[in-house]
Image (cartoon, coloured by chain):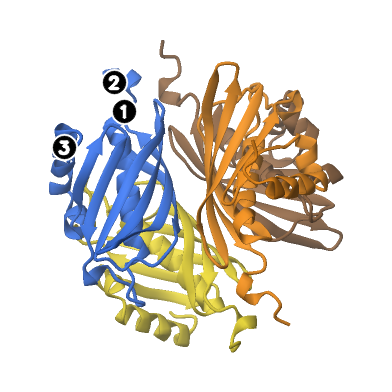
Chain colours: A orange, B brown, C blue, D yellow
Amino acid sequence: MNADPDLHAAAERVIAISPFARWIGTRVGDIAPGRVVLRLAVRDEFRQHHGQVHGAVLGYLADTACSWAAATVSGDVVTAEYKINLLAPARGPELEVVGEVVRAGRRQVVARADVFNIADTSRELVATALATIAVVTPRSEEGKP
Amino acid sequence: MNADPDLHAAAERVIAISPFARWIGTRVGDIAPGRVVLRLAVRDEFRQHHGQVHGAVLGYLADTACSWAAATVSGDVVTAEYKINLLAPARGPELEVVGEVVRAGRRQVVARADVFNIADTSRELVATALATIAVVTPRSEEGKP
Amino acid sequence: MNADPDLHAAAERVIAISPFARWIGTRVGDIAPGRVVLRLAVRDEFRQHHGQVHGAVLGYLADTACSWAAATVSGDVVTAEYKINLLAPARGPELEVVGEVVRAGRRQVVARADVFNIADTSRELVATALATIAVVTPRSEEGKP
Amino acid sequence: MNADPDLHAAAERVIAISPFARWIGTRVGDIAPGRVVLRLAVRDEFRQHHGQVHGAVLGYLADTACSWAAATVSGDVVTAEYKINLLAPARGPELEVVGEVVRAGRRQVVARADVFNIADTSRELVATALATIAVVTPRSEEGKP
C-alpha cells in the first residue's frame, strides 16, 4: 500500500537516475508526507568480513529514509549530517527502514530512521539514526532573483 | 609509504574477505598504530542523482577508517556508532580518508575521520566524522572462560 | 503517578547527592524499566543572551534522561556519547524530558530522549537526542575477581 | 594573549548578558577568526554523584566553543546540533575548551571542539565534540526585505 501515489512515483524516478540507489536495489514502500519506508534484498556484495551486512548499507538506508522523508515535506534537500547507532548484526534476507520527520523548519528538517532486519518470522531493529537535512531552496526565498 | 608493513598486510587480508570493501575498491594507504589512510577511485555506480558521490560511500570510508584505526590499537572491534557531517559535494576521481584514534579505552575507542576529494590539483575536505568503536574482547577479559 | 516506586526513590537518592542535578532543580516524574520522565522549572540563570534556555540545560536533560533510562535496566552506567538536535527555542516556564531505551546490550545501552517546553496551553518538542550509555559492570562480569 | 582584541571584547559582552554563561564562570582565552579558547574554574555545584564534573558542563563548553568559533567567521549563529563523546572523568580544578571551524558555508558552519581538564601538571583530553551551527542571517540574504 502506498499512502501517496504521487510521492511514490517521484521516489521511483529519483531511484531510476541514481546509480548507487539502483545498484543497491532500493525499493519504495509506504510513502506519505513526513514518512518513508524503503526496503532492499541483501546481496552477498553487501557483507563485511564477519558475514553481516556492512554498516555502510545500514547508513545508506538511514540517510536515504531521513532525506526522503524530509523531501516529502520540504522539496529539494541535501543531508547535512547524520548519526547512526548500529544495534545488532543484520544478515537479511531483507532490510527495511522507516524514516520520519521530527521537525520541519524553513531551512532544515530533523528526521530519524529505524532500520530493521526482516527474516521469515522476525523483524529486528538493527540500527537507529538521527539526521539534519538542509533544505536547498527555502520556500520564502523561491523566485527571488 | 606504509608506516607498518604488518598492519598493512592485515588490512589487505580483511579487504580480501570483505565483499563490500572489495566491491567498492578500498585501497590501503599509510597505516600505523592509531592512524589509517584509505583511498578509492570513484566509479559511476557510487553516484546519486545529482552526479555526486553518494553519502553512503563517504560514510563507508569514515566508518572504516575509524574502526580500522581503532583495530590497530585494540584488536577486534565493531563500530558502535558514528556521526558524519557532509561538507561539500565529492565528485572524484579519487577519495581519501584519514582516520585517527582520539582515545583508546579498555572497552571502547573514540576515533575521528576526515574524507577528502582528490583531483588533479586539489584536495578538498568533503566530510568529517566522529565514531565510537566497541572493543570486542577487552584485554583484561581475554582468556577468561 | 510513578510506575515504579523503588526506581523513583533510587532516582531521588541520586539527585540528593548530585550537586548539579540539585542546583538545576531536577524533579523525577514517571519512571519505569526502560523509560524515565524528568521535569524542571526554568530559572533566569538557565538563559542565554537571547533569553532562551541555554542548550546546555536541554543537553543536561537529554543526557540525564537517557542515562537514567539505561540505569533502570542495566544498573551502574556512564554516558559514552550523545547527539542532540536543538529544534526550537525553549522559554519555559517548565521543561520535561522523556528518555527511553532503544536497545539494551550487555555492555552498552542505546537510548533516545525528547525534550518538551511546557507552558499553560502548549507542549512543544524543543530538542531530541540519541545516546550511547556504557554499562559500568556488565552482569556477566560481576563477581569476577 | 588574545589574537583579536575586538573578538575578545565581543565575547565578553555576550557573557555579560548571558545568565548561564555568567553563572558558570566562562572566561575567554585566545580568540581569532575560526578558533576560540574558553576556560572555567570547576565549582562543587558542577559535580555529579561520583564527584566528577557533570557531562552537561562539558557539553556547555563544547557547544559554546563551537558556536563562538562559528560566530567569529559568520556573525549571528545558533547551534543546530552537536555530538559529544565523553572520554574521561573531569575533576578540575580548571577546564579548557578549544573550538575550531572545520568548514564555514553560507548557511551553516561545521565546527569541532576538544575539552581538556587542567590540573597542576597535566592537561588531559576529557571530551570531544562535532557540531553543526546554523547561520541566522546568511550574508547573501542580508538587507532583503
Identify the amino acid type marked 3: Ala
In the picture as drawn, the residue positioned furthest to the top comes out as B145
Q: Name the residue under label 2.
A: C142
Q: Are marks 2 and 1 in contact (CB under 8 Å)?
A: yes
Q: Position of residue D84 (x, y in %)?
A: 44, 52
Left or right: residue A54 compared with residue D111: right
Q: Position of residue B97 (x, y in %)?
A: 69, 48
Looking at the picture, tell me which residue is in the foreground, D107 or D72: D107
Q: Where is residue B51 in the image (x, y as percent from the top left)?
A: 82, 54
Q: Quadrant of residue A23?
A: top right
Tag 3's secondary structure? Answer: helix
Q: Distance between the residues labelled 3 and 2?
A: 21 Å
Tag 2's secondary structure? Answer: loop
Identify the amino acid type marked 1: Thr
- The numbered mark, 2 or 1, whose residue comes first in the sequence reads 1
Q: Name the residue under label 3.
A: C10
**Vertical comparison of D81 with D25: above or below:** above
Classed neighbour count for the residue bearing mark 3: other residues with Cα under 10 Å, few (<14), some (14–19), many (≥20): few
Q: Which mark is residue A105?
A: none
Q: How far apart are marks 3 and 1 (CA)?
A: 18 Å
Identify the amino acid type marked 2: Glu
Tag 1's secondary structure? Answer: loop
Q: Position of residue D72 (x, y in %)?
A: 52, 78
Left or right: residue D120 compared with residue A64: left
Looking at the picture, tell me which residue is in the foreground, D13 or D114: D13
Residue at horizontal 46%, vertical 36%?
B108
**Vertical comparison of A140 with C39: above or below:** below
Q: Name the residue under label 1.
A: C137
- The numbered mark, 3 or 1, whose residue comes first in the sequence reads 3
Classed neighbour count for the residue bearing mark 2: other residues with Cα under 10 Å, few (<14), some (14–19), many (≥20): few
Q: In which quarter of the image is residue B101?
A: top right
